[in-house]
Amino acid sequence: MERDILSVMMTMIDRKSLWGALVGTVLTANLLSAERILVEAESLSDRGEWKLDTQFIELMGSPYLLAHGMGEPVGPAKGSFAVTEGGDYQVWVRTLDWSEQLGQAEGAGRFSLEIAGQKIDHELGAGEPAWAWERAGEIALAVGEHPVTVTDLTGFNGRFDALYLSNEEGDTPPEDSSILPQWRRELLALPEEPIAEDGYDLVVVGGGYGGLGAALSAARNGCRVALIESRQVLGGNGSSEIRVWAQGTFPPSEYPLADIIKEFTDEAEASPAPAEQFGDAKKEAVVRAEDNITLFLNQHAFGVEMEEGKIAAVLGLDTRTSEVRRFSAPLFADCTGHGWIAAKAGADTRMEEGGRMGMSNMWMWHNGEEEVAFPHQDWMLDLAEEDFPFPVRFHGQWFWESGFDQHPINDLEKIRDWNLLAVYSAWSAMKNKGAYAERDPAEAAYAKARLGWLAHIGGTRETQQVLGDVILTEEEILGGKEFPDGCVLTTWSIDLHYPHDTYKGGTEQGRPFISKAVHDRGVDRKVGYPIPYRCFYSRNVPNLFTAGRNISVTHEALGTIRVMNTIGMMGVVVGKAAALCQVHDTLPRGVYENHLPELKFLMRQPGAHRYEKLSDLAADLEKADGLK
């Protein structure tokens, strides 16, 4: 994570040598040479029922396809590629044996490969406890176009990153987990220069509640905004992919910051709940209705360019085509939650050494009409009732959480996978070992029960904090300390999570997966505490805003500010501050030092108020009384 990804990405390629070395056909965004062929999994024309997983690009270098069938094999992924030189080809697949990586029996996520109608005998996904190129075998291929089919064999989260074929004896693909290393760039025939995306006042990275609030607010105050989101839906933890319902109330305030959030916040009746209750389409519609916002879904921001200590551009990877875009602007907002952009820009950050709040993967189950099996697998944990709570109301809720003492970035995929392992193992205990049998509403000991949904994307609570001019503490919140720039009302209790001391699942392995919440009720939910604006920007990267769980607070203070309605209002303040930066040719700190009355003026405006252009805002500020 400490390496300079930008230097890897922006290495210049000599055009003549590149095109002289490449012979082949471009098919579905892949360059296929006569001797070396690279097929990225995400570029397959038909992904079948495999999920496109973009959570761990920073760790293993690429999006990948995930066979998330909850124990039932998913439909095959299909595509094709061209061969210009016939002969025998060595076949390699980049994959990971996730169960073995966790110290369990191997092969939870096995899958097979068929090329040109020939099934490769070797089963993939077993025996590689780290991301690696697994040799699948050898195949004879004639000149022409050939189909490829990737078939899931287990339904238990097999993963497929890429297919590599070579007719050069002894050739093996490099074991490189950097993002788009040079050899992949060459085989994919990516342009030497990224696609330029410029003309923006503000680039917002992250389409969760903080990013949505920032983009909408900035756009309605006259800014031209690029909103970048790595996944295919908006909402972050509040999307249908993770299904955390939005918390944080909207008490009376002189600043109607909640107006914009109320336009897209969910109305879920539970957490988790059915997908439609999280309003993915509504969120996207609200964004696309703004002429000043350009939305870039499926774009993972993986690098930054710096000039004189400020961010000049963010580099984005298209998670479907591998194309690279360069987003430039005078201002940026890190709304990623993880603080990726801030860290890459060299911002001062703080990460709790241990005892962090973890990641949850929630789940749902139901009873059907027919009996359905869920055979116990040798890689599962051997669990009993005392290891996990009964999933009441057909829900596995927020407390299915782990990762407390694991690294919140480097171990992110392992934490997600441990959560999946915990759910599968608990479900097997219910289906096969009589756990909570008397609580089955169907009175069938779960013989007719099946998993209906399990989040394959983790909902993370804590990664790292981007330090601003104020680092808000628990003592300041509970003591009611007044800041002149206090604005966003946080209303959630100081809610910190710890491993549960009753349920022991995973403790033997040092990875407990059931949590408890400890609430300090000192925050008045009917009144709230105003978070200062100075928590919403970096103290040493002068053109970087933040909005989200990565703002400038201590671990304890994070317990109250991290819920989504509150985070959304942070974004609204950031959007208004960004507009003032542009009007006055200043930076986030300058808004506080020289234009705080104007920020308060904008914060008092209703969310529906609009300035189509920054010049309209400037004119209105000139006319307003008492702002100088």
Image: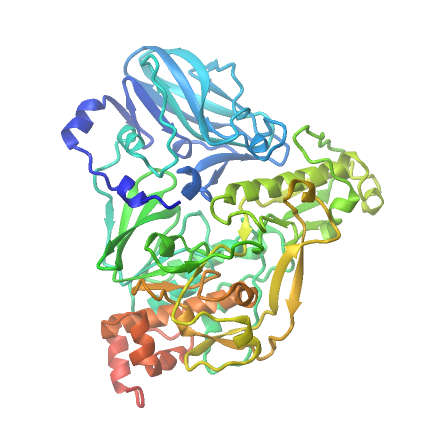
Does residue 250 appear left or right of residue 596 in this picture? right
Query: The N terminus is located in which quarter?
Result: top left
**Can residue 264 be seen from the camera position used here?**
yes
Which residue corresponds to the image point at 44% horizontal and 47% vertical from the top-left? Answer: 232
Does residue 207 appear left or right of residue 541 in this picture? right
Which residue corresponds to the image point at 67% horizontal and 43% vertical from the top-left? Answer: 506
Could you say which quadrant of the image residue 461 lies in?
Answer: bottom right
Does residue 262 appear left or right of residue 586 in this picture? right
Tell me the colour scheme of the image: rainbow
The number of numbered discs placed on residues in the rendered structure image is: 0
User: Measured along the vertical axis of the image, is residue 593 above or below residue 395?
Assistant: below
Which residue corresponds to the image point at 48% horizontal and 58% vertical from the top-left? Answer: 282
Query: The C terminus is located in which quarter?
Result: bottom left
Q: Where is residue 472 in the image (x, y as percent from the top left)?
A: 48, 71
Work out which residue is located at the far bottom of the displayed protein and give it.
626
Work out which residue is located at the far left of the displayed protein and give it.
16
User: Measured along the vertical axis of the image, is residue 478 above or below residue 500?
Assistant: below
Could you say which quadrant of the image residue 33 lies in?
Answer: top left
Q: Where is residue 236 in the image (x, y as percent from the top left)?
A: 49, 54
Could you say which quadrant of the image residue 102 lies in?
Answer: top right
Observer-nearest of 408 and 570: 408
Q: Position of residue 556 (x, y in %)?
A: 56, 66
Observer-nearest of 253 and 348: 348
Observer-nearest of 165 and 483: 483
